[in-house]
Image: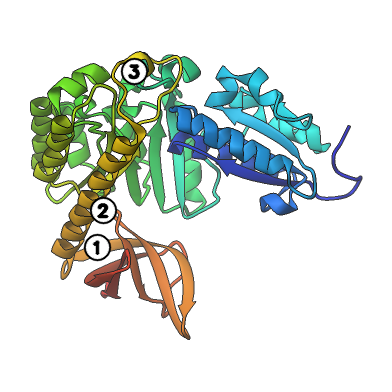
Amino acid sequence: MSRVADGAVARVAFRTLGCKVNQVESEAAAAALLGVGAEVVSEEDADLVVINTCTVTGEADAKARKAVRHALRLPREPLVVVTGCLASLDADGLRSLGERVVVEPDKMALATRIAGLLGAAAPRASGTAGGVLRTRAMLKAEDGCDAFCTYCIVPYARGVPRATPVRELVAEAERLVAAGVAEIVLTGVNIGRYRDGDTDLAELVARLAATGVRRLRISSIEPLDLDDRLLAVLASTASLQPHLHIPLQAGSDRVLAAMGRGYDTAAYAARLAAVRSALPGVAVTTDVLAGFPTGTAAEAAETLAFCTEMRFAKLHVFRYSARPGTPAAEMLPQVPAEERSHRAQALRLEGERLRTAYTEARLGGHACVLVERLRNDAGTDAAEGTSGDYLKVRVPADGVAVGDVLDVRLKTAGDGVVLGERLPR
């Protein structure tokens, strides 16, 4: 039975948890539904709420279930469609949360399932990108992972690596460029494992750059996948933005081995040095996991010191949360929750110091900024956007439109924003 009266507009809300791949998949579904006349609204106004879940940790599971319960309590009593990694692993558990919960593990079928529940027309395939919902579009090139890090459930939830055919990715990129999208972010669960026949990630980057996209980014990529061939292609790609996110997870060799990461600190440092040699001025950000089981205070200090030594532009710090079904959940001793929080806080403080140091070193320099929003503060119009190296930048908005790419001199920094002045082109 349709949830929407005849002639009414179907209203859908999306809450996306976890990684950028989930965000891409939510945007693809949203774009498909917009194409058949649905409206994307806030949760409070929705006839149907989609919860796109993450299951990378026990804490992620808890957040997903909390989001479902919140949606079920909304005054409009919407249907709640749950998708994502947790839906693949625990469909029955999610259905038990309420009678209005519908579980759809297959994200390729998500938009069609939603349309059927709302009584809307079946949407056409929405492509591999998240739709043209912003000035920046994400292009999903790969799904799945076979790394089997000991703390991670994702290979069990998403399966082994699978590539989107290169011809589809190039066609989608061409469509996005024609629609005026200024920046494409190439993403995947483990993007470095991309391979479609003889086409690897390096060849894919070259093919996408040839579409004429103004700005191209790669989302999180594992250190060992940044081989010399890929770095040579990145160095020759003018549209590539000067930022890479290269997960570290720990700065202790013993902990890295226990995590099953496949490299030690020397190998990571060598790859980072190669990256900086090939791409001078690149900003490198990273992920760090605090409180991994069996890790000692001394090893936590090693991680902190290694992060400082590597001069990251930003740290994304995650507190370890045991995920049932992973080897790490059975490792002893587990670090007490209070100590995990303490180690995470120490890393976050160092991350703030590193971010400040990186930003201050950039002041006086130039940046290309993609304008993403216009705002008014105390009667002053301003344009905000993201620089190539992922700084949040604000400039006067005279004659500026969303989607413009501006040449900017970076002047002062504060409260997470760099103030700049526009330069003539």
Closer to the camera in the image, 163 or 355: 355
| Left-right relation of 256 to 153 | left
Label 2 CA crowd tier, 10 Å (few <14, some 14–19, many 20+): some
Q: Which amino acid does label 1 sit on?
A: Ala
Asked if disc 1 and disc 2 are in contact, CB closer than 8 Å, the reply is yes
Q: Which of marks 2 and 3 is nearer the N terminus?
A: 3
Q: Which amino acid does label 3 sit on?
A: Ala
Figure colour scheme = rainbow
Q: Distance between the residues labelled 2 and 3?
A: 34 Å
Q: Which of marks 3 and 1 is nearer the N terminus?
A: 3
Closer to the camera in the image, 208 or 12: 12
Q: In this view, does 318 lie above or below 37?
A: above
Q: In this view, does 350 lie above or below 374?
A: above
Residue 162 seen by the camera: no
Question: Looking at the image, which residue is at 41% across and 71% down?
Answer: 383
**Where, by quadrant of the figure, is residue 381 drawn?**
bottom left
Question: Looking at the image, which residue is at 72% across and 28% down?
Answer: 102
Q: Name the residue under label 2.
A: 389
Of badges 3 and 1, nearer the viewer stands 3
User: Which corner quadrant holds the N terminus?
Assistant: top right
Q: In this view, does 2 lie above or below 362?
A: above
Of badges 1 and 2, nearer the viewer stands 2
Mark 2 residue element: loop
Q: Name the residue under label 1.
A: 367
Q: Mark 3 points at which residue?
A: 328
Residue 347 location (% of width, % of height): 23, 44
